[in-house]
Image (cartoon, rainbow, N blue to C red):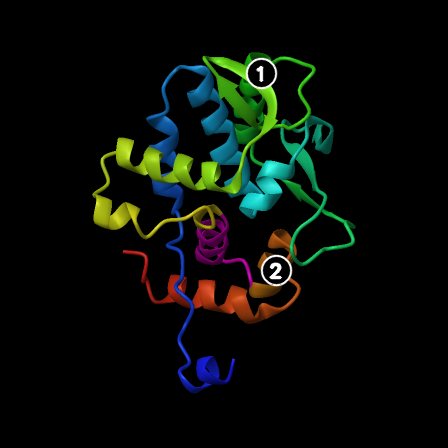
Amino acid sequence: RKIARSRPTRPRQARGLTADELHKILSVQPDTPWGTRNRALLSLGYDLLARRSEITALRAEDVTWRRDGTLEVLLRRSKTDQFGRGRVAFTSRRSTELVDAWLYCRGGDITPLFCAIYRGVPIDRPLSGSTVKNIIKSSLSAAGYDRSIVDGFSAHSLRVGAAQELLRRGHDGAAIMRAGGWKTPTILARYLALAQHNVWT
């Protein structure tokens, strides 16, 4: 720890996924069970400003359909909520349509909202965090992005990019903190500083 303090380094920041990039990677998903799942996962994760652990922990019972065509989602636990009090977040109508399509494909008797798929058949096994990362990276590659760009993205890019997008749309830091479940402004401030300086280009 003493050596680390004597040589301070700034944590490597995942590149935020922009709304335009999200649209592109949604559009390149194949019309297969994997593509149907990935479209729902990417859209929902972006809307919820979700960590990969929050995405993989979701269950169908955590999702409530609202009259306005959006979803209310309970994120039960995260690294900043070890007691499992959870936070409630809301989605776009796009995510509602994509989640509906995925649940129709997935069928019942499966616990995780987003599950593994074996030989084209959804099975009752949750996804790993690394799978979320791989979905993002492989989708960007399929959309034609160069590997040098793809390497800058991670599973955290949905959360980072959504926070930056909210800032660009005029939302203040306090509102973004509530939307993403941040307890302190330190990390969020780093994301938003990148957005303000157009570092994602």
- Drawn side of residue 101 relative to residue 195, left or right: right
Point out the image quarter for the C terminus: bottom left
Quadrant assignment, res 134: top left
Image spot of residue 62 (x, y percent) = 72, 33
**What is the distance, in whole Å, between disc 1 and disc 2 at their CAs?**
33 Å
Which of pointers 1 and 2 lies earlier in the amino acid sequence? 1
Q: Which residue is mark 1?
A: 106
Image spot of residue 106 (x, y percent) = 58, 16
Q: Nearer the viewer, residue 56 or 89?
A: 56
Q: Is residue 122 magenta?
A: no
Q: Which contiguous range is marked in magenta?
A: 159-172
- Drawn side of residue 140 relative to residue 185, left or right: left
Q: How many other residues sit within 10 Å of disc 2, few (<14), some (14-19) or many (≥20)? A: some
* Callout 2 secondary element: helix
Q: Is residue 169 magenta?
A: yes
Q: Residue at x 56, y 64 (%)?
A: 173
Residue 54 lies, with reference to residue 118, above or below; the image says: below
Q: Nearer the viewer, residue 149 or 93?
A: 149
Image spot of residue 136 (x, y percent) = 39, 39
| Nearest to viewer (mark 1 / mark 2) | 1
Q: Residue at x 68, y 27 (%)?
A: 60
Task: Determine contact: label 1, label 2, CB under 8 Å.
Answer: no
Q: Amino acid at mark 1?
A: Arg
Count of labels in the image:
2
Q: Which residue is mark 2?
A: 177
Q: Amino acid at mark 2?
A: Met
Image spot of residue 177 (x, y percent) = 61, 60
